[in-house]
């Protein structure tokens, strides 16, 4: 091989390596935890509870951590969500310790409120039996053998 070819191969390899390094650094700088508006797709600041551009509000959710729905996340998009063991509830749990109409969660001006609907075994929030409670982000609800985490949108 002649010297000019070797130098061209080395220079080309160095250029490719430099390009790979630049791309790796650029992708590492991206904020992987950006909140993006579901309405206009603009980036939202973490302290915003709604998009300041279009007014979109992210849905609050129930993240199931134990029981028949473990691993599932269900958005609270309706005004009233009922949880029980029979059809007709918004969320149906096939759990023998869950009453037919066990608990209701409704949207109120301050957020969401949970109320026991006369269940046999009660509703536990953060380990305490409660007939009614204003939910806050991170509350853990237990209905029968099912546990879920309330996540504020």
Image (cartoon, helix red, strand yellow):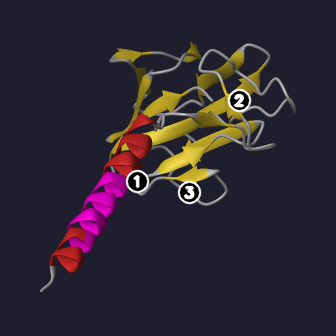
Q: 111 above or below 17?
A: above
Residue for point 57% across, 51% down: 91
Instruction: Decide if residue 6 is in sight here.
Output: yes
Looking at the rendering, the stretch of residues picked out in magenta corresponds to 8-20
Task: Point out residue 148 in the picture as x, y percentages from the top left corner.
Answer: 42, 36
Residue for point 12% across, 86% down: 1
Residue for point 49% across, 47% down: 73
| Left or right for 27, reference 10 | right
Label located before the other in sequence (3 or 2): 3
Label located before the other in sequence (1 or 2): 1
Q: Is residue 62 magenta?
A: no
Badge 2: residue crowd in 10 Å (few <14, some 14–19, many ≥20): some
Q: 100 above or below 116?
A: below
Badge 3: residue crowd in 10 Å (few <14, some 14–19, many ≥20): some
- The residue wearing badge 1 is 69
- The residue wearing badge 2 is 106
- Secondary element at tag 1: loop
Circle on res. 112: none
Q: Quadrant of residue 108?
A: top right
Badge 1: residue crowd in 10 Å (few <14, some 14–19, many ≥20): some
Task: Point out residue 78 in the picture as x, y percentages from the top left corner.
Answer: 75, 42
- Secondary element at tag 3: loop
Q: Main secondary structure of the magenta part?
A: helix
- The residue wearing badge 3 is 86
Instruction: Decide if residue 70 is in sight here.
Output: no
Q: CA distance from mark 1 to mark 2?
A: 20 Å
């Amino acid at each position: 091989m002649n010297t000019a070819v070797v130098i061209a191969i080395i220079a080309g390899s160095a250029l490719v390596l430099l390009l790979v390094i630049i791309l790796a650094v650029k992708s590492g700088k991206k904020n992987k935890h950006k909140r993006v508006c579901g309405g206009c797709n603009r980036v939202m600041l973490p302290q915003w509870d709604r998009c300041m551009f279009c007014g979109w509000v992210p849905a609050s959710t129930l993240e199931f951590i134990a029981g028949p729905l473990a691993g599932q996340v269900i958005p609270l998009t309706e005004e009233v969500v009922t949880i029980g063991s029979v059809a007709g509830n918004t969320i149906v749990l096939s759990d023998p310790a869950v009453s037919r109409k066990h608990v209701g969660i409704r949207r109120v001006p301050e957020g969401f409120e949970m109320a026991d609907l006369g269940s046999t075994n009660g509703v536990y929030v953060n380990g305490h039996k409660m007939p009614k409670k204003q939910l806050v982000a991170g509350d853990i609800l237990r209905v029968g053998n099912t546990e879920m985490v309330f996540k504020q949108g």
